[in-house]
Amino acid sequence: MDLMEKLTILTDAAKYDVACTSSGAGNSAPRGQGIGSTADCGICHSWSADGRCISLLKVLMTNRCVFDCRYCVNRRSADAPRAAFTPKELAELTIQFYRRNYIEGLFLSSGVDRSPDYATEQMICTLELLRGHYGFTGYIHAKAIPGADPLLIDRLGHLANRLSVNIELPSERGLRQLAPNKSKRSILGPMAAIRDGITQNGEELVRYKSAPKFAPAGQSTQMIVGATPESDLQILRLTEALYKKYRLKRVFFSAYIPVVEDTLLPALETKPPLLREHRLYQADWLLRYYHFSSEELLDEDDPQFNPLMDPKCCWAVRHMELFPVEVNAAPYEMLLRVPGIGPVSARRILRARRGANLDWEDLRRIGVVLKRAQYFLLCRGKRPAGLIVTERNTVRALIDGAPVAQAEQLSLFGSELSRPAQQLREAAAECFVSGI
């Protein structure tokens, strides 16, 4: 099999892994030594037709796998063409792509060929060639294999900018059912080892500036959404726990895409739950930057996100007793709870109001999204002129609009929604209000 055939098979086999990000690592080669660099703000990304990030050269070392995860296109029992790179082939390919400006880094994962240790050793050999022989100092994201020896994971972390261990499914029961070769312990063990390695490396760098770096961009994980029946609340609780206990940089969500047929999986005709994935990403943002907790956003009585409204707006509508708040007096934490105000605009408000009381035009210049925020704010004790706030018109204004399948193109000569879409929004608002 020639190199191009291998590349076609192994890049296609890697496309379902979305735990791929390059932010948070900054390093460059000394003048005249090595090639490649990584900026703190991340590297360039491109996007696939379905909206997924396809940055870096995203490839598997091999798609041969001794595991038989039912949802995986590379599982042992799948009837698929198999291929494997040698470390030298993949290192040379990466460098040639980089020199031609096709890529700015590498995302490397692998099927579990023979054993987790063997698969990890092959990845390490590839990265040692890139870092040592070729002097490549650009961004590398490596996927740690569950069950691999901690010493191998330690070596991998000293070669890569970021490590990730996919948690795969939101519950241990789901793992037992769909990924019987994996366990909660085999996944969380490497996560803990990476966390401890990053902590120890931070202490070493304080003492010795020249100490080798260990996964300087941290670690991340991915979980599949929709393959098993866990609720959004269960997924969000797990996400929150991962951030707190393992200090992850990101938790990525991947809407389950039916690619193989199995009686325990949703039917092949099932559409990927992309809107649900989107709501989970919005909620993840609220956990990380807005100081929300999972229990505030969902509870046992309402364990699923409403598809009609983003989680922050949904929370605000369900807690109208806390609003409106005076923008010239509200603390930072409360400003973050207002739809249409983010961390940047909240900090701008705090700085601007030191010199004068803000009005609505000031908020617009600061960057507040008044289309949403006006229902929850007072400026100098007043609402915008002519605005009448009721629960129903607030919900109607905040609903995202018609589902994608029902959406119609807006008229070029009018600002109102087409009548079918408008009727759908009004009906959705009525249903939402009646359910509060």
Image: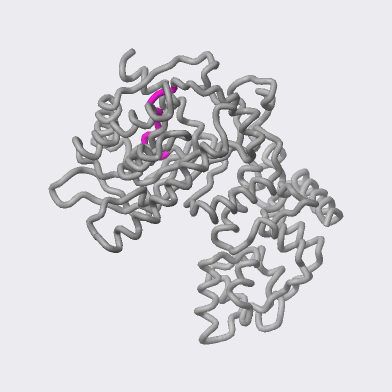
Which of these two is toward me, 313 or 77?
A: 77
Which of these two is toward me, 215 or 369?
A: 215
For this view, does 393 lie left or right of residue 234?
right
Residue lying furthest left in this view? 32
Q: Residue at 64% across / 45% down in the picture?
A: 235
For this view, does 45 lie left or right of residue 88?
right
Q: Residue at 34% across / 54% down in the picture?
A: 201
For this view, does 390 lie left or right of residue 271?
right
What is the magenta range?
A: 55-63
Say which quadrant the C terminus sits in.
bottom right
Residue lying furthest bottom in this view? 355
Q: Residue at 62% across / 64% down in the picture?
A: 340
> Is any atom of residue 412 visible in this view?
no
Say which quadrant the N terminus sits in.
top left
In the image, residue 151 lies at what x, y percent? Answer: 36, 39
In the image, residue 419 lies at what x, y percent? Answer: 77, 46
Which of these two is toward me, 434 or 261?
A: 261
> Is any atom of residue 356 visible in this view?
yes
Residue 58 falls inside the magenta stretch: yes
Which of these two is toward me, 53 or 38?
A: 38
For this view, does 258 lie left or right of residue 21?
right
